[in-house]
Amino acid sequence: MSSLTTTLAKVILIPLATALSLVAWGPAVAPAVAAPVSASATVSTSQVHVAAVKKYKMATVKKHKTAKSCWTVVGTGVYDLTKWIKKHPGGSRAILSLCGKNGTKAFRAQHGSTGAAARALAKYKIGKLA
Ligand code: HEM
């Protein structure tokens, strides 16, 4: 009789206790699983923000020295002037002379730091000097 009671206890009580403990853990486990998902969404948003300001070494700028790809530096900014070469009211040669170089002195000597030329320049900014 006592062994029957023991068997009954094993067959009914143990699975019942296991099921109840799972129900009890359920709500506690659920937020723990959900939390990392929303945390990773926040991280990816901030990564997009960081990627917005690119940094380039002068060695990289120097590679873009032709009319096919013309980058220059003015101040701390890096500019891709490729599409501006043919648009420049002062002629294409003035822009070509800046490709792959630090164009700060040449640009400021001709145009200063404010006005139409500075506004045109701002549209071609691709990043900052590393
Ligand atoms: C670095 C990029 C440059 C940009 C974005 C730029 C932009 C401009 C803009 C918007 C104008 C028309 C408005 C104005 O006269 O201010 C202009 C005119 C002119 N630019 Fe530039 N410029 C650049 C570089 C240079 C350089 C390096 C030189 C000379 C070495 C130069 C020489 C001139 C001249 C002579 C004019 C007057 C053209 C005329 O109306 O007769 N520019 N530039």
Image: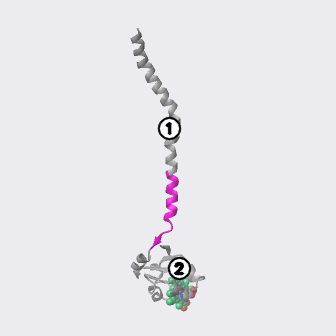
Give residue 107's position: percent from left, percent from top: 52, 85
Give residue 60's position: percent from left, percent from top: 41, 75
* Label placed on residue 46: none
- How far is the residue under mark 1 from the one under mark 2? 54 Å
Which secondary structure lies at badge 2?
loop
At horizontal 41% and vertical 15% (from top left) the residue drawn is 6
Q: Which residue is mark 1?
A: 29
Q: What secondary structure prevails in the magenta region? A: helix
Residue 46 shown in magenta: yes
Earlier along the polypeptide chain: callout 1 or callout 2? 1
Give residue 87's position: percent from left, percent from top: 49, 83
Residue 57 shown in magenta: no
* Label placed on residue 75: 2
Query: Does residue 90 appear in the picture of this structure?
Result: no
At horizontal 44% and vertical 83% (from top left) the residue drawn is 99
Residue range highlighted in magenta: 40-56
The residue at label 1 has a CB less than 8 Å from ligand 1? no
Q: Amino acid at mark 1?
A: Val
Which secondary structure lies at badge 1?
helix
User: Looking at the image, which is closer to me, 80 or 83?
Assistant: 80
Q: Amino acid at mark 2?
A: Gly
Say if 6 sits above or below 81 in the image.
Answer: above
Say if 6 sits above or below 125 in the image.
Answer: above
At horizontal 51% and vertical 68% (from top left) the residue drawn is 53
User: Looking at the image, which is closer to me, 86 or 71?
Assistant: 71
Query: Does residue 101 appear in the picture of this structure?
Result: yes
Q: Do the residues bearing badges 1 and 2 touch, measured as CB atoms within 8 Å?
A: no
At horizontal 52% and vertical 77% (from top left) the residue drawn is 76
Q: Quadrant of the N terminus?
A: top left
